[in-house]
Amino acid sequence: MMQAITILGSTGSVGKSTLDVVSRHPTKFKVAALTANNNHELLLEQCVVFQPELVVMVCDQAASNLQASLKVKGLSHIQVESGVDALINAAVTPSCDTVMSAIVGAAGLLPTLEAVRAGKRTLIANKEPLVMTGDLFMREAKRSGASVLPIDSEHNAIFQCMPQDQTKKGVRRLHLTASGGPFLGRVWSELANITPEQACAHPNWSMGQKISVDSATMMNKGLELIEATALFNIPANNVEVVVHPQSIIHSMVEYLDGSFLAQLGAPDMRIPIAHALSWPERIESGAATLDITEIGKLNFQRPDMVNMPCLRLAREAAEQGGALPIVLNASNEVAVAAFLNKEIPFTSIANVISNTMQALSDLAVDDLESVLNIDNEARVVAARALDSASW
Ligand code: NAD
Ligand code: MG
């Protein structure tokens, strides 16, 4: 049967890779809806090729531009909506079976949660919503019966290595691999003059700007640690991080008997995307075959927690739980945006997060409303912390 897919964030790195996989299997997949923030030119190209029923742009002006261009191309039958609420329409539209959640940051929370509540098969690349709502998110999935399939390469690897029924039967620990990013081996305090261009130049993966900076600070692995505790319902102290610079082993599951199961592959997001789109079957992803003899050696080392302050803060948030993961995520988004705008030095990202966590350590989280309130409050406190962190 044809699977109809909505892609939230189709103009981003994961969104484009998803469309690449979809285009390789025209008899299996079709596109129900596409969404983007403001890149109407690329969304137009995607409309021409994939002919969705609905497109949503967050920016009103970009939506008007897109509508005008669609008319010129004779594609006026494609419905165009704009605004944040319309993202939810795209996520729950009855004609879609599967939602790829590939917006960056907390902006993806509400549409992704609504997709899960509507019982859609939901593919999670956008890790920030899981970091913010953890158990609540997974509870909603259980209630609606929605399948939640991880796209983040580490979590997709773990999913593939877990027992088939996805219980934790016999599992001792999870090992998340981390490339270490572009500054592996460097002393943190000596990174103050790093530019956004240097921080975004990841050695193995080509990704959006925010996750590239997160990879350079190691916050990405910290967010993934929290993501893993939610997805696999496992305590943070049973999730290890191991630095593996080649990014060939995408993560490992350690069993009680001493067995380790690992998933290997080229560092190409089309592999986890194809896996999740077709699960439980397998399809071609377009990724190059891995030649392990070419690679020759795989290296592993413990993370240097002294020079990875963001990973340290994330582990603290993961272990303490409560409001801290929400505060960590929100203050990180504020700090990374300020760094990309050249308002604060690279190394101040950790200070902004640490100050915000200290200021907001004991807020209670009961429901979605409290999550959104804490997220807001943390953004206000972090914005204030930027002043003392600026150049
Ligand atoms: P990206 O910046 O390349 O793309 C982001 C997409 O979200 C774009 O389509 C953009 O239009 C849309 N968007 C941005 N801000 C928005 C907003 N406020 N409201 C609605 N839409 C908005 O990002 P990416 O690298 O594709 O990453 C997307 C998510 O997937 C992130 O959460 C990231 O952590 C996760 N992820 C990415 C990769 C990767 O290889 N790129 C790997 C694993 C996980
Ligand atoms: Mg990852």
Image (cartoon, rainbow, N blue to C red):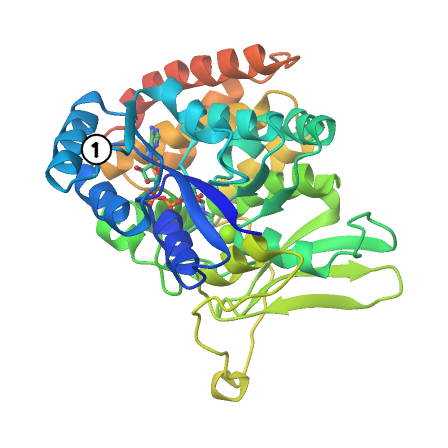
Find residue 260 and report its horizontal and vertical position in percent.
Answer: 76, 67
135 is higher (above) or lower (below) than 304: above
Which SS class for mark 1?
loop
> Splitting the image into 4 quarters, where does residue 182 fall?
bottom left
**Camera-side residue: 344 or 99?**
99
**Camera-side residue: 52 or 184?**
52
The C terminus: image quadrant: top left
Find residue 2 and report its horizontal and vertical position in percent.
Answer: 53, 51
Is residue 123 visible to the viewer in this orientation of the structure? yes
Q: Which residue is mark 1?
A: 76
Which residue appears at 51% of the width and 57% of the height? 28
Find residue 55 and report its horizontal and vertical position in percent.
Answer: 32, 33
5 relative to 232 in the view: left or right: left
175 relative to 21 in the view: left or right: right
Is residue 195 visible to the viewer in this orientation of the structure? no
**Camera-side residue: 271 or 266?**
271
Quadrant of the displayed image that contains ligand 1: top left
Label 1 crowd bin: few (<14), some (14–19), many (20+), radius 10 Å: few
